[in-house]
Amino acid sequence: MARTRTTDTPKTTAAQLRSIVKSARDVMRKDKGLSGDLDRLPMLTWIMFLKFLDDMENIRAVEATLAGEPYRPVIAPPYRWRDWASQEDGISGDDLRAFINQDEATLPDGSRGPGLFKTLRSLQSVNGSGREEIIATVFRGVSNRMESGYLLRDVVNLINRIHFDSSEEMHTLSALYETMLQEMRDAAGDSGEFYTPRPVVRLMVAVTDPRLGEVVEDPACGTGGFLVEAYTHMASQCRTAEDRQVLQQSIRGGEAKPLPYLLGEMNLLLHGMDSPRIAYGNSLAQPLTSIGDSQRVDVLLTNPPFGGEEERGILGNFPEDRQTAETALLFLQLIMRKLRRVGAQSERGGRAAVVVPNGTLFGDGVSARIKEELLREFDLHTVVRLPNGVFAPYTAIPTNLLFFQRGGPTEAIWYYEQPLPEGRKSYSKTKPLRYEEFGPLLDWWNDREENEHAWRVPVQEVLRYDDAGALLSANLDLKNPNSGDALEHLAPEELVVGIMEKEQRILVILHEIKNVLSER
């Protein structure tokens, strides 16, 4: 939907918007209930979310009037933003907190009834799949942490000055919001959500090259980085209003945790999606065998969680010889299942770009069987080996990018070892990876030759079988044969990381043994 102003209010400049957001965050710092960015950004987000919804409701109401059609608002009075938030001298203090927090309260019109959050959490559409369900899901996972209703009134008044029906203001806000997401992740440190650096996201989207009309999904979308980048990539291909409508239906996601779900919804809304199609819940909860053609997609981009442990009920959704405690391997199986088949649905088959830890490359047992399926049924055409510190400070575990598509088997795998800048031993929070450093990789992508960073490995060197044809190993953890570094002693920090990887693998094996014993 195009952003169409419904009032004559002068638009807010980029500098004014930055000042508004900064002032709102400064007010929040005064509140004792909010301890830091980890609390303040979710608070700011749900307030912005409600103002955004009201501005969009105004647009839809005007469009319905022009078309001579009736319009039923998603949020009814007196719970709309305009009813309780738009007047600077509106309800404040304890009355505002009670209206928002309590199951029953005095409403802005003086009557008694359910509080704001109670009402929003109970919204339902006629068909059970409308904007009402998105709003209800968002607000089941958030709470008002501010202790001062007067400071909360100040924040509301500031956000009321933002016009979410202005394309110019939305562009500035989307960039501001991404900056705030980065700051929140930095505040969380290594205990926060696993964050995919924007240069890595841009690279994965650029080389998979989603085309308008294709469906893109991230089953573990977090705050929506991959989906936003894919949406932006395809938006540049739109030429007509019909193209825009196609684009709105082209993005899907899934997220299991309430906070990232809220932040991801807001991130996508600010970047231009009218009604983001993010499913709230664990994407692994659906049995693999129940995933049919209607649920398959053209492009799958993701950085799935790893190192976790799923409950036994989730493991039951996977084949018995593919069940594992390693979450990354479960997601890898889900991704393979969800790619479109070659044929009527897709001329060349679905394609994927996935971030995986080193342990996925060298793991045996269940890991080897899953990789065997990947190499037999799909074309794993490229593995990009990322250097140390790309994900600092969130994790020190070395990571890789897998690029594959339907239409296997794999005949040979291209490896590309992304080098560190000259004189550097690692990236860091203060000196992170820059997208421009992927320039040589992007130049190489469509015109491949072996060089000091790239080499080609026949699949026979990866899959090893015994004389009886039983799988022995499926080792994708192959070192660069053209690099002298492969012959040098590892640095102490690399040795520590290697030990951590082995311990992680031992824990996975122990969990698998435990599960087997518990079934006897």
Image (cartoon, rainbow, N blue to C red):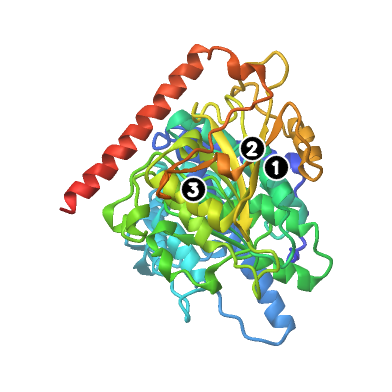
Task: Tell me where residue 231 sits by quadrant.
Answer: bottom right
Q: Where is residue 220 in the image (x, y as percent from the top left)?
A: 50, 51
Per the image, label 3 sits on a secondary structure element best described as: helix
> What is the C-alpha distance between the residues marked 2 and 3?
16 Å
Question: Between tags 1 and 3, which lies in front?
Answer: 3
Residue type highlighted by circle 3: Lys
Question: Please, which residue is most extreme toward the front here?
Answer: 467
Q: Which residue, given by chain and number where applicable, does mark 2 sit on? A: 384
Rendered residue at 60%/20% (across/down): 486
Question: In this image, 81 relative to 365: left or right?
Answer: right
Residue that mark 1 sits on: 203
User: Would residue 25 appear left or right of 513 to someone viewing this image?
Assistant: right
Gap in angstroms between the C-alphas marked 2 and 1: 11 Å
Tell me, yes or no, whether the two marked residues, 2 and 1, touch with CB atoms within 8 Å: yes
The numbered dot on residue 221 is none
Mark seen at residue 371: 3
- 149 and 80: which is toward the camera: 80
Q: In the rendered image, is residue 35 in sight? A: yes
